[in-house]
Structures are given as structure tokens and as C-alpha cells.
């Protein structure tokens, strides 16, 4: 096939291999990115377009009134890019967009998704790309509702019950809770509805690397598997770019040339969501100091304008909810404002674009920031062939002083009338947080990666460290001489260290009361099964069928409701503020915990839930059931209920894993009557790179690399991914079998 990219300087070829990966061979780097843009648009145009609608605050213009809250929220906080500065990477962005727009111009009919939505493809610009980066930083870790929820809980029930259940909390934080007690109690929890209807709070990833001293090849190695909601098409688009003396492979969001994770002949990098805290919540007692008017275009209707109050450049949340009709506009003694660190920090389209051209880890770090600004919220580990190893917190963040419990940590709202809480921004050199560690390895898994290191808080509400500890455990167990097979086995590991922490408390609860009322056959059965469980969440495990549905019933929240009374905070906490995750059974039962006095009450709840789970399993599955019977994966296209897309689905299939295993499987919480758990979130892909030979690597996608309704690459890799198999990938042209070749004149 001949394709037309008018700006291409020489002939280029897009060669699709047998598993659906495009290999772009060009005479220049710019032309390679032109080919990448064309290939991506040809497979993912609707996904690209939809993401740009979200990022530019124009989703309601196509999808109607339900997206008005999201568009207004984004406009109020400057998520869409503004005052876009020039960048050294702009030439790459422009080349990529030329490829995308060339595909748009080649269309002879409107693609079906666009017809369904009543819109058409358009040309895409630097504004789209710059907005997409900012959008990524906004949605990957929205910590502000955790802060509101924690502040309200402490104001109503006292600091003592909760201060040990957050990563960092200082005396000054406690003083501010007391200072703002009445104002915190008055916050209307309807502000939580500003998160909807577009909700992408859950994210994650595993990423680790070793130095040459620990590898069998004598070169550094890196393994990465980012966790995303499972869907067709896949979250990322995968491509290989080749120009004279340069090859790069990577995963990018459709519509941007930035390789979030990737490698070339010199350097490899992987990424995890950093749970980086880029939001501050303020209580305001003075009237707003200014207003901003934002216009939202709505499909089939006239544009709507909203006047939003601000204080010191921070939008007032109640002003947003009042404008949207979520709350009634009333006289208030106080208001809640929100600071997003990027709101008043313009960012370019070209930032990050130079990463695939890096010659070493230092180059890669330099490409992450422009004038100390990076729009992301990620941990990035990089290794190069010269055995350098660096970890960057790729973000823009405020330097709150309360790292060692002196000063405020930012974990709860702040008094907006104190100027001392206007914090300066960190510099890029302060965000190189790890360099050539003496143990020879680096790892991140959405945990607190800083520990006692650093001078200001970075992670306020990190995930459990179970996956991170398991990576470290496996690296230390073998010690050295790792090869790519060792790393693929690690990515498929099913031992749940979080379960190992919780299980002793569950067993104690099941064995602690021998009264007739509680010494039921179901409890005896469950106890015998669980005490012999190895905490491996294999799909054939029988014990897992009791343990995980029991934990999913959230006995810790049931206890808190019994002690504190039913309230909206506890009822919605799992869905709205999942970062408040340090309330698990073992957290509440620590010796020093004030919750320990309710131990018997918690144990009674565990026994009650255990009986319910066992009875349900027996009534629905008889006596033989396995984790894979109730823990299954399925995913598909968002339009799967319509004929054109009805075949774009896979599953249901039994699968092992949990949110805390390296083979990660996030599942929905069942309702009170059921135990079945649908897996909807996990590794979007897995790959392992040995820098001894970066032109060959291990790789597999959770589905496929296409989004076109009739493509053979929609989910062609799904079965291999499900079974833990990998493709042996090559980037050498003579070693590849091509299904089709597209080229320019």
C-alpha cells in the first residue's frame, strides 16, 4: 500500500509484523515519527480523538450534558494547555502530528465510532498534545478527596483514631484540624461528585531494574508492566521506530509521541504511577477574591457559561457544585478551595518528546523536565549500557515542609488565610531521587518509595507496599545472575504478601471464640482451610475463595461504622477515597492502635462474614470451588452492545492474582450477597529488556495492538498474556515476518 504523508522528506515504510506491531523504517528521526503518527491514527483514531476531547475540556461538545461537570472542572483548573511555550522537542511533535493528520486526510468515509458519536475526525495540534500530558498528570492520582475525608473524620471523631493510619501526619497538621474543626465539619461531601462521570482513580504498575553486577549477561536489565483498566483497544499503542543508527521501541498513549515506557540501543526506562501528591485543599473563611467565566460547549444545545469563584488563584469547589446544580447556592461560613500545582504552570507539547533519543540515563532525565516543569506524576527508572541507573520522580510538586513530622505534610486541608502554606516548587535536580544504589537494584510498585529519604513529602497516600516487598524479596533470594526468564517469572508471581499480613488476624478471629453461637461448622471448615493456605493466589486455590471475598466485605469499615455510626464518609470511602487504605485489619490491630480495644467486635464481624461466604460458596458451587470460579477476567470495547462492535470482547476466563500480587489483578467489590469478583484492571503489557541485546526482548500485550472493528490484532495476544506466555521480539528487519507493508512515495 502507498500512503501519503506530504511532509515526509524521504521514503518511509510502515511494516506490520505477525502480531500487529508496526515497525517504521525511515531515513530520518522526523520521518520515523511521521510514520508512528500515521500508524497510530490508522489503528486508534477514535481512542486518540476521545482522549483529546477529555484533555481539552470539550467532551460535552460531542457526548452531551453528562460530560459538563468534567469539562467545567478541567477548564477551571487549566487542564487544557494554555500559553504553550516553545520546546526543543516540538519538531518531533510536529512530525508525529503530520503523520496523524495525513491519515485523517486519507479517509474516504467517516469511521463508525465517529458516526455513532455524531462527529468527525479533525486535524490535531500541539494544543492537543500539551493538554494530553497535563490530563495525564491530573487523573493519575487525585488526592484531594482523601484529604477532605480524612480531615472530616478527624474533626468529627478526633485525631487520635486516625493519625497513625496515614503515611505522614504532624503536630502542626493536628493543630490545623483543631483550628478548622467547625469548617471541616461543614464541608459538603457532594464535592465528591466533581470526580464524575469520568473516573480513572485506579492505576498502578510494577517496575524494577538491576545493574550489570547482578545480571547473567553483564549488562543492566529492566522489567516493566504498567497496570491499567482492561479494554479493547489497549490503553497504549506499541511501535518500533528505526532510522540510521537509531532504533527505539515504546508504549505511548494514542495521540502523543512520548514513549511512556521504552528503550533504544543505549538506554531503557520503565514507569509506575508515583502516587505523587500534586493537590492541596484549603479552607477559606474570607469571601472569594476573583471570578472566572468558563464556557462549555454541549452537543445539540447552546454553549453554557459558568462563573466560578476563586481565592488566591484557587477555584472554590462549592462554587463549581453550585454552578452545576449539585448543591444549592447558600450562604456559607467557609468554603473549600483546591490548588493543583500545574494550574498556573504552562507546559509545552515538546516536553518528553526527546526521551527516545536519549543516549544515557542523564539525557533521559534532562528530557523529562523543561524549566523544572514536568506535567507527569510518575516514578521513572532508567538504566543504560554504561551501567548507570537512575530513578526520577517525574513531576511538578510543591515542597511541603512536613517530611519528618515537622511542619505540615499536606495530608489534610490547610487554613487558606495563612500565607505560610504557599509552598515553593521543587527543582528537577531535587527529583532525581535514586542514583546507582549500592545494592544494585531499583524498584517501584506504587508504594512509598522515599521512606526516610528526601526533604519534602512526595507520596501522601501510596498503595500497599506488598508488591514492592515481593520484588525486593525475589531479587534478594536469587541475588545475581538474573536473565530475562527470571524476570518474566517474577512478573507472573502470585504470592500475596498483603494476605500474609492479614491472615493471622483472620485465623485468630476464627479460633478465638468457642461458644456455641460462634463455633459453627462453617467457621471450623474455613479455619482448617485457611490455616493450610500458602497465600498464593492461584486460580486453583480453594482457600482464596474464602479469604478474598471476606476481605472484600471490608470488615474494617463495618467495625468503624459500628463504633462511629453510619455516615456518608465511611459508606463512600472505598469508592471515592481509596487512598485511605491504611485501615486494613492488621493496621487496626497494631498494639499501639486505639482501635485495638474493639478487637472482639472486629473478630465477631470476621466470623459473621466468614459464615456468609462459606454458605454462599456451598449454595452456588457445592463443595468444589476454586479461585478461578469466582475470580474471572473479561473486557471489551465501550460500544460492545452495538452490532458493529459486538464481537470486540474477550472472556470470561478464570485468572489468579490480586491487587497485591506481582501478577496483578484488580477486581470489583462484590455486593453483600455475592462473592464473584470481576477482574477489570491489571498489566496492560509485560516486557523485559536486557541491555546486552536491546534489539531482542520479551513482550506481550493484554489483548492486541489494534482498535479497528475488523482487525485481526484486536485481541490476538490475549491468550498468551492470560497464560503467562511472552513473544520473543526482534527489532532487526531481516528477522521479521511482515503481514503488510505501507510506504510513502
Image (cartoon, rainbow, N blue to C red):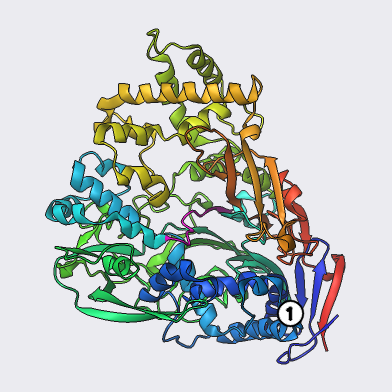
Residue depicted at 58% across the width and 36% down the height:
676
**Is residue 281 covered in magenta?**
no
State the image coordinates of residue 619 (x, y, percent, origin top left).
Answer: 59, 22
- Residue 451 in percent (x, y) is at 37, 50
| Picture coordinates of residue 510, whole percent (x, y) | 43, 18
Q: Is residue 717 left or right of residue 152?
A: right
Relative height, residue 668 to residue 147 (above, below): above
Q: Is residue 92 above or below residue 148?
A: below
Q: Is residue 207 magenta?
A: yes
User: Would you identify the image quadrant in which residue 143 lies?
Assistant: bottom left
Quarter location, residue 406: bottom left
| Quadrant location of the N terminus in the rendered image | bottom right
The residue sitting at the front extreme is 301
* Left/right of residue 723 with respect to residue 611 in the rendered view: right
Q: Position of residue 546 (x, y in %)?
A: 54, 26
The residue indicated by pointer 1 is: 243
The answer to whether any part of residue 457 appears in the image is: no
Q: Nearer the viewer, residue 642 or 454?
A: 642
Is residue 80 in sight in this rendering? Answer: yes
Q: Which residues are magenta?
A: 196-210
Q: In this rendered view, identify the residue nearer to me: 714 or 271.
A: 714
Q: Residues within 10 Å of mark 1 (few under 14, many from 20)?
A: some
Q: Decide which of 9, 599 is in the foreground and name it.
A: 599
- In this figure, what is the number of numbered marks? 1
Residue drawn where x is 19% and y is 78% of the image: 289
Amino acid at each position: 500500500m502507498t500512503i501519503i504523508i506530504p511532509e515526509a522528506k524521504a521514503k518511509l515504510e510502515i511494516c506490520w509484523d505477525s502480531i500487529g506491531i508496526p515497525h517504521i523504517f525511515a531515513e530520518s528521526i522526523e520521518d520515523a515519527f511521521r510514520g508512528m503518527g500515521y500508524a497510530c491514527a490508522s489503528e486508534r483514531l477514535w481512542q486518540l480523538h476521545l482522549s483529546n476531547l477529555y484533555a481539552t475540556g470539550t467532551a460535552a461538545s460531542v457526548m452531551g450534558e453528562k460530560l459538563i461537570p468534567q469539562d467545567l472542572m478541567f477548564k477551571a483548573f487549566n487542564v487544557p494547555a494554555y500559553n504553550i511555550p516553545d520546546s526543543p522537542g516540538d519538531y518531533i511533535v510536529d512530525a508525529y502530528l503530520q503523520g496523524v493528520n495525513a491519515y485523517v486526510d486519507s479517509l474516504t468515509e467517516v469511521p463508525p465510532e465517529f458516526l455513532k458519536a455524531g462527529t468527525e475526525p479533525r486535524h490535531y495540534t500541539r494544543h492537543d498534545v500539551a493538554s494530553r500530558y497535563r490530563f495525564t498528570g491530573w487523573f493519575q492520582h487525585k488526592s484531594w478527596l482523601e484529604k477532605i475525608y480524612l480531615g472530616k473524620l478527624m474533626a468529627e471523631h478526633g485525631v487520635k483514631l486516625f493519625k497513625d493510619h496515614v503515611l505522614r501526619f504532624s503536630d502542626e497538621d493536628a493543630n490545623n484540624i483543631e483550628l478548622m474543626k467547625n469548617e471541616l465539619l461543614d464541608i459538603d461531601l457532594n464535592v465528591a461528585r466533581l470526580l464524575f462521570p469520568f473516573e480513572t482513580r485506579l492505576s498502578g504498575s510494577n517496575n524494577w531494574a538491576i545493574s550489570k553486577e547482578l545480571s547473567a549477561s553483564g549488562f543492566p536489565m529492566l522489567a516493566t508492566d504498567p497496570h491499567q483498566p482492561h479494554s479493547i483497544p489497549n490503553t497504549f499503542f506499541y511501535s518500533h521506530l528505526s532510522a540510521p543508527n537509531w532504533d527505539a521501541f515504546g508504549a505511548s498513549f494514542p495521540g502523543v509521541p512520548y514513549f511512556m515506557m521504552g528503550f533504544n540501543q543505549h538506554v531503557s526506562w520503565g514507569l509506575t504511577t508515583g502516587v505523587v501528591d500534586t493537590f492541596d485543599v484549603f479552607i477559606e473563611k474570607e469571601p472569594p477574591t476573583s471570578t472566572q467565566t468558563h464556557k462549555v460547549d454541549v452537543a445539540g444545545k447552546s454553549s453554557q457559561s459558568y462563573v466560578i469563584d476563586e481565592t488566591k488563584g484557587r477555584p472554590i469547589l462549592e462554587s463549581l457544585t453550585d454552578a452545576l446544580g449539585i448543591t444549592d447556592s447558600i450562604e456559607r461560613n467557609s468554603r473549600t478551595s483546591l490548588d493543583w500545582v500545574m494550574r498556573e504552570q504552562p507546559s509545552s507539547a515538546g516536553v518528553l518528546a526527546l526521551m527516545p533519543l536519549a543516549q544515557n540515563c542523564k539525557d533521559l532525565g534532562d528530557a523529562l523536565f523543561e524549566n523544572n516543569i514536568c506535567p507527569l506524576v510518575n516514578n521513572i527508572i532508567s538504566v543504560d549500557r554504561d551501567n548507570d541507573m537512575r530513578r526520577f520522580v517525574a513531576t511538578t510538586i510543591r515542597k511541603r515542609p512536613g517530611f519528618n513530622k515537622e511542619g505540615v505534610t499536606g495530608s489534610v486541608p490547610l487554613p487558606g488565610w495563612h500565607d505560610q502554606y504557599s509552598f515553593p516548587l521543587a527543582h528537577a535536580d531535587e527529583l532525581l531521587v535514586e542514583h546507582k544504589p549500592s545494592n544494585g537494584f531499583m524498584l517501584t510498585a506504587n508504594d512509598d518509595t522515599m521512606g526516610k529519604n528526601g526533604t519534602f513529602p512526595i507520596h501522601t497516600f501510596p498503595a500497599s507496599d506488598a508488591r514492592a516487598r515481593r520484588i525486593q524479596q525475589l531479587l534478594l533470594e536469587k541475588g545475581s545472575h538474573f536473565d530475562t526468564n527470571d524476570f518474566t517469572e517474577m512478573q507472573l508471581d502470585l504470592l500475596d504478601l498483603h494476605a500474609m499480613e492479614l491472615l493471622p488476624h483472620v485465623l485468630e478471629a476464627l479460633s478465638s471464640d468457642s461458644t456455641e453461637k460462634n463455633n459453627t461448622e462453617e467457621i471450623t471448615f474455613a479455619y482448617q482451610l485457611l490455616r493450610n493456605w500458602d497465600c498464593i493466589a492461584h486460580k486453583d486455590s480453594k482457600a482464596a475463595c474464602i479469604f478474598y471475598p471476606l476481605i472484600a466485605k471490608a470488615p474494617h469499615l463495618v467495625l468503624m461504622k459500628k463504633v462511629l455510626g453510619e455516615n456518608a464518609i465511611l459508606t463512600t470511602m472505598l469508592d471515592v477515597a481509596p487512598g485511605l487504605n491504611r485501615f486494613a485489619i492488621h493496621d487496626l490491630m497494631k498494639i499501639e492502635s486505639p482501635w485495638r480495644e474493639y478487637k472482639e467486635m472486629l473478630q465477631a464481624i470476621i466470623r459473621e462474614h466468614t459464615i456468609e461466604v462459606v454458605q454462599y460458596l456451598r449454595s452456588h458451587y457445592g463443595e468444589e470451588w476454586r479461585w478461578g470460579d469466582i475470580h474471572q477476567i473479561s473486557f471489551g470495547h465501550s460500544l460492545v452492545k452495538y452490532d458493529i462492535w459486538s464481537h470486540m470482547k474477550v472472556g470470561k476466563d478464570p485468572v489468579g492474582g490480586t491487587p497485591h500480587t506481582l501478577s496483578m489483578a484488580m477486581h470489583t467489590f462484590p455486593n453483600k450477597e455475592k462473592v464473584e469478583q470481576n477482574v477489570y484492571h491489571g498489566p496492560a503489557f509485560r516486557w523485559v529488556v536486557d541491555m546486552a541485546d536491546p534489539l531482542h526482548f520479551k513482550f506481550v500485550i493484554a489483548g492486541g495492538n489494534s482498535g479497528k472493528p475488523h482487525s485481526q490484532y484486536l485481541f490476538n495476544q490475549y491468550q498468551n498474556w492470560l497464560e503467562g506466555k511472552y513473544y520473543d521480539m526482534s527489532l532487526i528487519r531481516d528477522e521479521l515476518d511482515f503481514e503488510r507493508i505501507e510506504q510513502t512515495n
